[in-house]
Amino acid sequence: MEAETRFPAMGSTVHVIVVGGSLRLLDVAREVIEALESRWSRFRATSEVSRLNDAGGRSLLVSGETVGLVTRALEGARMTGGLYDPTVLGDVIRAGYDRSFELLQPDAGRGSSSFRSGYGAIEVDEPRSTVRLPAGVGFDPGGIGKGYAADILATQILSDGAAGVCANIGGDVRVAGDAPDGSSWPVAIEHPFDPGRMEVVAIRDGAVATSTRTRRAWGGTGDRRHHLIDPASGRPVWNGVASTTAIAAEAWQAEVMAKAAFVAGIAEGLHLLAATGTDGLLIDDEGAVYPSAGFERFLAEAPPAIAV
């Protein structure tokens, strides 16, 4: 049996393909994602992430999923030397991204926030399931949440009896187990300026994530902004990069590496991918494509794409 579902969540579209198991697993997918969004959305005042940001430096008891989210975010920041920073929430809001993207006006102005960055002082106590953000530091799950949600969802669907699963949350894709045709899962990487031009990679068990400035952008002429922030300047990145894609074992890793490579730029981004044993693809503002040294091995025998 092969079944699939699509539904809106996490400010994007969730696409789940299940191979084997019960049709009930499609309902499980919705339940898992809704539960994670209720804990992680910065646009829900009652979420655990919002409560952490409002705690004023106090330690809070949170779910195991949120402990996992923060732990992985800190690991991502350290392994990229801070090019990925989960505490740029204040900069994101000041850039104007102060509400769910579907509610953001195309000509939205700049926002106001007193949050500062500082991931190095975040404290996580896994045995007690507590997290403490320093007072005034804002945690933003946007750079890792969709990827980690895809990982959690894929793990849950497999443990509930599926033979294989593809979880695609807003372009962060995690695949595991059997593909519909018994071989690899094909994942299409779209070109940011030419939707008809794409690379298709074949993944047996792993993840693909793309970061691009061409989708979530706003602001008037001469003041265009987007959601990919340079932690060093606190401003949206304009370095000649249009999009970056990373391939990794897990989707949270792929999402972190795609964002870090975007911030780093073409040359340093490729160096970062190589230094961390990650493969991927960078595309500049002129549409030129720069693959990592090992990217070509994922192109071998890739069938027509079913997950984008």
Image (tube, rainbow, N blue to C red):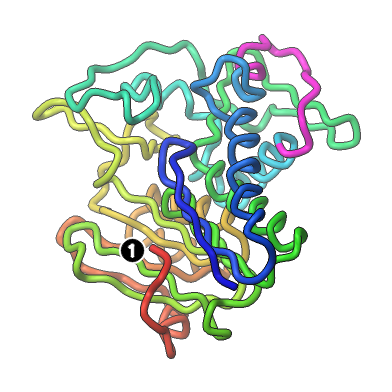
Residue drawn at x 38%, y 63% is 308
Q: Which residues are magenta?
A: 51-65
Give the image location of residue 70, x and y in percent.
67, 37
Quarter occupied by residue 96: top left
What residue does disc 1 label? Answer: 282
Closer to the camera in the image, 180 or 93: 180
Looking at the image, is 302 positioned above or below residue 197?
Answer: below
Asked whether the viewer can see residue 32, the reply is yes
Give the image location of residue 77, x and y in percent.
59, 44
Closer to the camera in the image, 14 or 89: 14
Looking at the image, is 144 positioned above or below residue 118?
Answer: below
Q: Secondary structure at mark 1?
A: strand
Looking at the image, is 106 positioned above or below residue 22?
Answer: above
Closer to the camera in the image, 7 or 141: 7
Q: Amino acid at mark 1?
A: Leu
Residue 172 painted magenta: no
Looking at the image, is 117 positioned above or below residue 288?
Answer: above
Residue drawn at x 23%, y 17% is 109
Residue drawn at x 68%, y 62% is 22
Give the image location of residue 169, x and y in percent.
48, 50
- The quadrant of the picture occupied by the N terminus is bottom right
